[in-house]
Each structure stands twice: as structure tokens, then as C-alpha cells.
Amino acid sequence: MKKIYLTLLGTVFALEASADFTFSMRVGEWQVDSVYIVDTFLNQVVGTSVYEYNSDGSLAVDYSTSREYDSFLEMYVTERTKAVSSYNNGLLVKEEYFRQKGNDWVIMSMYEWLDYDAGHAGTIIYYEADDDDEGQMLPTTKWVVTKSVGSYLADFEVFQYDFGQWEPYSKTVSEVNEKGQITKQTCTTQGVGVEYVSTTTYEYDEHGNTTKKVTTSDSGTSENTFEIVYDANGNISTVSEFVDGTAYCPLYFFWSKGGKTAIRSPKQLQNAAPWYDLSGRRLNGQPTQKGIFIHNGKKVYNK
């Protein structure tokens, strides 16, 4: 389960990977209703995000669900979370993250934007709930932003809260092309008497969405590529990510027009689900013999 996906989809800023793949929640009269993450091996939905909007079209709440499989390949829900966004004069000022516990929502963490002018500068503080102190929200990380490009953080310093004071952790500087896209970021991280430097370069498609990210650091080089498929309306239909050549669960986007939110299921994926024997070997279509097999992530008796 790629938790990073759900995090990026539910927030305006991808804070620690500031030019990673992101997208517009609304394009013209269209808005994203929901996003599904599909396990291509079992052809099952393993994660969802469902969105609610304010009257002005801004994102209000992102409800996310992640699922896993037990040893018998039976799916069960592992976690339900939601992200609630708050605004002031059209600017995002707070994002709160909750997890569901029984019938209640328990706060886990929060981002707070202080004196932030979108596209320019400001401060962002991240808080986490302290379970040992009755859920009190304690500051842990701070971003001091001196430059941003659209919805991306470009030049910023990161501080960590340690023993009552903010300690410098890293500094990121970006190069921007004439289209206003970040093409390169250099991050310098403070170690114990040592500075570590990593560089990340980006490539984009004609719609401005990231198609390739290459990061080089002391630990080596990693490459993320994104294959993006658009529908007939020009909206994103599918995004598949490959990390160093290895494919991860693709994202399926569902849009609506006119501001009505609808939760839909990608039935075409379920209908084409492959069959497996109990050893996990994929079969060439539905088996002809009787027995127990795996289909749609469940044990099925084939008569």
C-alpha cells in the first residue's frame, strides 16, 4: 500500500517531496470525486480517497481507506483516515489528520500555515498528537519558506523541534524554468558534523504533470517515472508509478461535472480479475476443473 499517494492527494503541498507528482482537484467544471489504488496482482482495490468540496470549489475533506490481505488472501480494512482543510480569505491555513477509532475520529497530526502568502513565503509547522499526554498537539517540524512556485515549495529550510528549540535539519534550493516548473532541487541535510547533499531533477508532460524524477545522493541514485493516461475530457484517468523499474499500484481517477460528488467502483477491473490456484500461480482464465481457487482476492469454489 503506497501511503505516499494518499498523503499527496489529500494535501496542497507535498512538503518533503515538493515537486513530486500532484494534480488539480478541479479542472474547469470538472472535479475529482474519488481515487482508487488497485493491486494489479490480485486486481483488487486496496486504497481509496473520496473528496468533499466547499461551495467555492476548494477541497474540504479527504476520506481515505487502506486495505490489506491476510494469509488466505481475504481482504480486510486496516485503517480509515480523513484530512480536513481550513481556509482564511481563500488561503489554506490548517490541515488536520484524523483516524477512525470505533465511531469517533481521533486527531493524529496537523499542518498549520502561518503568515503564508501562496506563491511567496511563510512558515508551516507540523504537529503530532502525543499519546502519552492526552493527545496534546506538539510541534515536531517547521518549514520556513522563502520561495514557492504555484503549489510547490521551492526554496525552504526545515527545522526539527528538539528539547524546546528549533534545530536546523535541511535546506532546499530550486531551479525553475521559464514555464514556472521546478527542474532541479538541491537539498543539504545536517548530519553529526557532516553535511549530506542530494539533487533531484524533474521532467514534465505537456499538461505540467511530473513524468520523471531522478534523485542522486550519497546512498545512490533512484528513479521514479509516472505514466499518465488522460480521458477524452483531458482529465487524468490513470497514473502508474515505477520506482527503479518496479511497478507500484496504479491510481484510477473518477471525475464529476457540476459539483456533485459520486462514489463509483471500477467494475471493469473486477470483471477482468484473473484466477489463481492456492499456490498463487496465475491461471489462463477461469479453470474448467472443480476445486478451490482465488478470484477477486477471495477463495472461490469452482463447480
Image: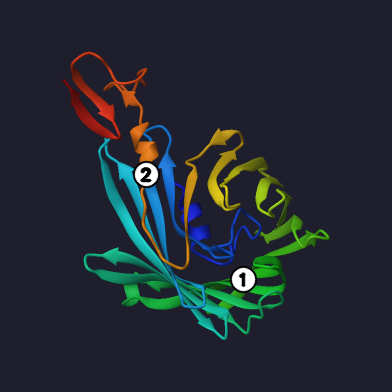
Task: Specify whether residue 193 is in view.
Answer: no
Task: Report which quarter residue 147 is drawn in.
Answer: bottom right
Image x and y of residue 132, in percent: 33, 72
Q: Residue furthest top?
A: 289
User: Residue at (39%, 44%) from the top-left corner?
Assistant: 266
Question: Alpha carbon of mark 1 to alpha carbon of mark 2: how far?
Answer: 37 Å
Which residue type does callout 1 highlight?
Phe
Task: Specify whether residue 49 is in view.
Answer: yes
Task: Report helix, strand or loop for mark 1.
Answer: strand
Q: Which residue is mark 1?
A: 159
Q: Which residue is at the front of the view, 26 or 284?
A: 26
Task: Report which quarter residue 224 is drawn in.
Answer: top right
Indicate which label's residue lies in the foreground, 1 or 2.
2
Q: Is residue 92 above or below residue 286?
A: below
Task: Report which quarter residue 183 is drawn in.
Answer: bottom right
Image x and y of residue 204, in percent: 71, 50
Q: Which residue is mark 2?
A: 45
